[in-house]
Image (cartoon, rainbow, N blue to C red):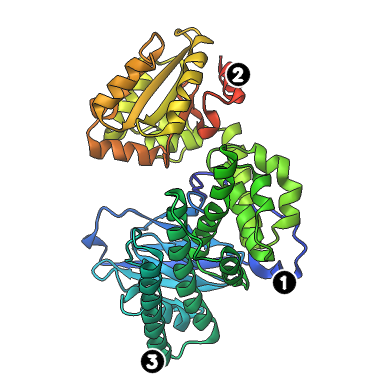
Amino acid sequence: MKQLLLLLLPFLCLCCNSSDKEYEDYSKEVLITGKILNRDFYPQEKDLTLIVPFFRDQETKYVVPIAEDGSFSFHFSPYAKLRNVQINKFADHILVSPGDSLHVEIDFKNILNPKIFGDAEKRNQETNTFVQSGRYYIEHYSIRGDLEPEAFDAELQQEYQLRQERRQEFLEKYKPDEEIQQYTNKLLEIDYYCTLISYLNNRSWQNKDISRYNKQEIFVKVDSLFEGEIIPSNIFKLTEIVNSFISYPIYKMKKEKTTLDDIIAAYPTGKNIRQYLYAASISQSLISNDTTLFSSRQKQLDSIVHIPVLNRELHLAYQNKKDFLKNPRTVSNYMLYGNYSDMPNSKIDTDFMKPIYEILDKYKGKVIYLDFWTTSCPPCLKEMEPLKKLRKEYSPGDVVIVSICAGGPKKTWEDLVKRLDLQQPGIDCLYQTDISDENSFYKILNRLELKGYPHYLLLNREGIIVDYGTVVRPSDPRTKQKINSLL
């Protein structure tokens, strides 16, 4: 979670060691002011969220209240010559450059057509026409993934050609400047390769033949998309798909988790794509609150990754993770109570979180270790023996483990609990429907920032989440050290 704003974590202006002169001015702040019209049409909307795209689960989010008169404002550094940001739910593509000052008018009675004024007004109105109308741009390809390669290629090429024809129609009608021409073309090409490489990934995972495709030729073509200073948000999605395309064959050969060095050795030769791929790997470790990879590789990172939008976001994410681990109360209060204060008396209970509050009340004064898992998750099941060993290290009076099955048939869960001998003193085994209805449980997972399984939460004796994610898995020796520090 990276909720940067006046509210959650302090905004830090970090300086990186990049010496690239062409990037010097990219930190100039963008100012976005705005006005909500017909606010009473959606009276439940009390605030707005600006999302600055990055790798999955590492997007920067700025949350600001909507003032009584409907006004709002955001300011941030884009770290790119041209990139898109979004006001969640209301404006998906706002193009910004360093130093821009924009005014966004959002009519709650006509939310599909936000109006943008100020710097680059024409550019943004044209972009909005291109991406919002549904006529010129559709992000996702509707091609079945189970098609054989020849049929898949035919459909992919046909749909891509249709999209380019619609783009050409847009260009002829609106005559946008060179940057918008580049931006719209890049959007289409990235979507194309996201679809193609995702298809190849799926076939690889299913052990199906992909010999029809020349991997190196694909990398050469994809590499050009990472060049230049125009950065659409879907470039981060493409990076993750390419990363998976590179790492899976290594995993298949080694039969174990791939290391960063394994992946680096398999990188394509392009300078920019290497920067994105390396940054994606570091970002993935920070998602799970693991700061050790960044700290141990910082010199290497700064020598490889010079693109400001990558380098500075990673430095900022790393600093925020360090701040959380040092003083977790603010983030814990957000995750448990939905508020951004670090004051103990500012807690406001949320109805759907009551099952979690009941666990906190039941084991008040103890260290609580929560394990969220599913019956069909091999990594989850692999951690069960280490979980039981961890249990034996501590008195149930000091540490309690709560095992919550978040997915899979209940009968399968019951069989696994019995076979794995999980139901023992100090391990509270719960099934999702026994503690909450499906809709509320989904809200719990979202509030706790749970993106995959297994997922762990470690709470101190005061009921504060002091660590979370896969970094505190039972098999990691550091987990025992962290628990010891809380006793």
Of 361 and 248, nearer the camera is 248
Q: Which quarter of the rendered picture does the C terminus lie within?
A: top right
Tag 1's secondary structure?
Answer: helix
Mark seen at residue 485 = 2
Say which amino acid is labelled 3: Lys
> Which label lies toward us, 2 or 3?
3
Residue 404: x percent and y percent?
A: 35, 26
Residue 349: x percent and y percent?
A: 32, 32
> Which label lies toward us, 1 or 3?
3
Tag 2's secondary structure?
Answer: helix
Residue 467: x percent and y percent?
A: 52, 30
Residue drawn at (51%, 68%), measured in percent from left and top? 232
Give whichever of discs 2 and 1 has the lower sequence position.
Answer: 1
Of 64 and 309, nearer the camera is 309
Rendered position, 400 above or below 65: above
Q: Is any part of residue 441 visible from this angle?
A: yes
State the separation of the CA atoms marked 1 and 3.
Answer: 34 Å
Question: Is disc 2 in contact with disc 1, using a CB cutoff of under 8 Å?
Answer: no
Mark seen at residue 173 = 3
